[in-house]
Amino acid sequence: MTNARAAVRTVEALREALGADNVLTGAGAAAYRVAGAEPTAAVVPRDEADISRTLALAFRDGLGVIPWGGGAHQSLGRPPSRYDVTLDLARLNRVVAYEPADMTATVQAGIRLTDLQQRLGAADQFWPLDPPLADRATVGGIVAASLAGPLRCRYGSVRDLVLGVRMAHADGTVTTAGSRVVKNATAYDLTKLYTGSYGTLGVLLETTLRLQPRPAVERGWLLRGTTIEQCHEAATRILGSHLAPNRVELLDEACAGVCGISEAGSALVVSFAGVGEAVQDQGESAGTLAGEHGLRAAEVKNSADMWRALQDWPWPAHGWASSAVSVLWRGSVLPSDAGKAMHAVRDATSGHGDVAIAATASHGVLRGALRASTGDLAARGVAAAREALTSLGGFLVVMEAPKALRATLDVWGPMPAEVKWMREIRAAFDPKGILNPGRFIDAI
Amino acid sequence: MTPAARDRLAQALREIVGHDGVIFSPDELRVYECDALTTHHRAMPDLVVLPDSTDQVAGVVRRCAKEDIPIVPRGAGTGLSGGAIPVQGGVLIVLTRMDRILDIDVANRTATVEAGCVNLAINRAVMPRGFFFAPDPASQQASTIGGNVAENAGGPHCLKYGATTNHVVAARVVLPDGEIAAFGCRLADRPGYDLMGVFVGSEGTLGICTEVTVRLLPLPQAVKTILAVFRTIDDASNAVSAIIARGIVPVALEMIDQETTRAVEAYAKAGYPLDAGAVLLIELEGLQTEIAMEAVEVEAACRAHACLDFKVARSEAERTLLWKGRKSAAGAFGRMTRNYYHQDAVVPRTKLAAVLREIAAIGEAYGVRVPNVFHAGDGNIHPLLCYDARVPGQFERAMAAGDEIMRCCIRAGGTVSGEHGIGIEKRDYLRLMYSDEDLATMRRIQQVLDPRGRCNPGKIFPETGHAEVRA
């Protein structure tokens, strides 16, 4: 943190550059707390020029800047090593260009996902992503953290659904990368580099999205089994068949219980979307395939609630863990190891606490909660879970933990040798390290 | 390079790749003076090497780095933007000997192959197991996966499935200093910057990939191929938008104009009508029930735009024949015109009709025939500028018309390449799309991975930019 005099200077400079109304301090700035740290000032820019001005000033003085969308996912990452200014993109919330027949939309980064989907829905289209905590999430935040949900099974991840960007760099310079059309092979695709960079390479201003037709119907089926391995086998069968599922989620008993999906045993939930008859056929075929692995199939009425809970998972586990210390995490293994990994994490953590896990079977992505009676046990549980996933060739990332515990946890886990290039890229893009300092991998 | 230095280098490289792995004689080197871009510039490499392993590639690269000699990777040489032309000489590293399929992992739906593996060879290996690799550039019978990665190759089926970048998950890369790195990962969402994503489409300027792990998709249950015939290009273009507006995303949606259908019929007899202004070749893939319903929608969209005939292939033989017409367009053009220049650009789908009208007018103004056969579904056009190199002035007129077409596509909100890449062909057009700051930002990646600008120099970025990096 800057000392008091420096803080006053920062606020004065920002007010002069942007107008006093657009610079919040005191209680206004306190609302932008990240991992317990409060900024000296929170800036709510009116336009791109305001953002450039703010960054140029911060760059000159070496201030730590945290870009802010809806604040939905600010729990991700390590605590900031320095936090002076919040850049709240709430006012950059316009749809810049939308032509339904092009199936692309260019939007400002601060637009809320729900507002965007509503706008696209009028033309029966959508941006096919279902990240957790979507009510508050903005497009900029989703791209920065590369947040996908169960729908990735059919539509791919954020990197497949972003075509171009406008970025404000650490010194305030604005550049474009990618394009506004669905196909592009012109020079380096920096759009990919920015996606999932957690705001460490620049502040996303505007992005062009690849859209999809919104299916007329989506129906869900619950396939119940005894063991997670059994459910995983059935998932693998479905994914290797000609069926085109929208979502294929593996749930352990605890997760299925917390989400109110089933009371005993492990579960596989699948959905199909499209035109009525084809959806019905696929649901029945999936039930038959799963039946061959001993699973019992039933259609889920009002499956929207179920998908909502699984989209947000593991956040709904907060209630389940209310009287204990809880840590939310994600991890990845090869899809063929997803069932094994869920089992391994449960076994590895059993002496320390309980876990509740869902996994996107198509991608081997696990999302879990761990609850333990003390912080110490929780820390040991996280280490054991990480060890279990690492021994399967995977990794674990901590997404949320109580403040005291968080400082002691290794949020991102060990990095591969290639991190040295990432470090150099970060230095080339943000030589003073002012953007989200200390929060990303390797304390970048 | 002096003859003595060249001899010394050849000897050193023979120690790495073996005696038969170095091409030295001028006659044999001439084969490598250009790729499939023959209209712009040719340049002889000092030497060609044919490594057989990642270690050999790394050895060659290290040796060249030591002497500051430019290196240029090359696959099958089918690239259309000159990416494999050694404009500053140096050592051409040809990866065609590295064509092994290393692993097919059905459970995780990936295949790992060496960079010299031919695109179609991947499909031959995985199709019997019920899977396919989606990118299908027209060159797929010859082009290598390494080249596909370098250029971010596309193809007709990109409309639904996306281009190479959407189907590559990891690669082994020999960096410009000879270090071997692993870009990307078979695990989803590994934290860190997406180096794999930047590498795809970097045209050999950031290193040489030697192994690639690609994503496989399960084969669809059913396929339906349709030929829709229109009186005018306008009608066909509007039908394209109408199909998409109905919420249908075919796997392929190709437009073939009248000049092309005539050339193709004379050559391949695919059953295309000769009197139509344009035809659409439409392919639907998926579940039987699903595509049956989609076909009804597609027909309605076409009929609403004065479709003259709507023909669904009833057998695999009919389907193959319809595609044969599309795929033999290049061969047919070869018989129709003495020379041609094959362009590549993308415009928003909704601007297709207007852009195609403008291209016709440009062709007329310059006295250049411009047949067009292209991926209409994603607005990826391929105007073919016909000329006769023996007639003075024709080549220049064709190039000038091509230049106008590029500018027209940018004005429409498009891009100067959809799938062929920039290479040496389009370096000067990049400035129509990107500012100096945009390009300088991209070059930060090059400065990190290839600070001395030795890896495929003279490609992608406009001339002046490169001098800055080398300084």
Image (cartoon, coloured by chain):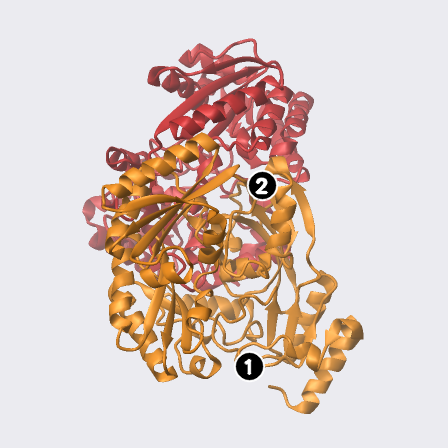
Q: Residue at x 67, y 78 (%)?
A: A29
Report the residue that reaches farthest toward the bottom: A4
In the rendering, at what x and y percent does residue A189 appear? 51, 51
Q: Earlier in the sequence, mark 2 or mark 1?
A: 1
Chain letter behind tag 2: A
Seen from the viewer's position, the closer of residues B390 and B244 is B244
Tell me the element at label 1.
Answer: loop
Q: Residue at x 56, y 9 (%)?
A: B275
Left/right placement of residue A136 relative to residue A223 reads right
Q: Residues within 10 Å of mark 2 (few under 14, many from 20)?
A: many
Kindly identify the amino acid type of the residue bearing the numbered disc 2.
Gln
Q: Residue at x 67, y 37 (%)?
A: B412
Residue A69 visible to the viewer = yes
Left/right placement of residue A307 relative to residue B29 reads right
Q: Which residue is mark 1?
A: A36
Kindly identify the amino acid type of the residue bearing the numbered disc 1.
Gly
**In this structure image, what is the colour of chain A?**
orange
Q: Quadrant of residue B440?
A: bottom right
Q: Which residue is mark 2?
A: A125
Q: Which chain is depicted red?
A: B
Q: Kindly identify which numbered label has been placed on residue B438.
A: none
Left/right placement of residue A303 relative to residue A55 reads left
**Where B4 sits versus B230, above or below?**
below
Give the Cα separation between the discs numbered 2 and 1: 39 Å
In the rendering, at what x and y percent does residue B41 appear? 49, 38
In the rendering, at what x and y percent does residue B406 appear? 62, 36
Left/right placement of residue B165 relative to residue A136 reads left
**Where A89 sits versus B54, above or below?**
below
Seen from the viewer's position, the closer of residues B466 and A318 is A318
Chain letter behind tag 1: A
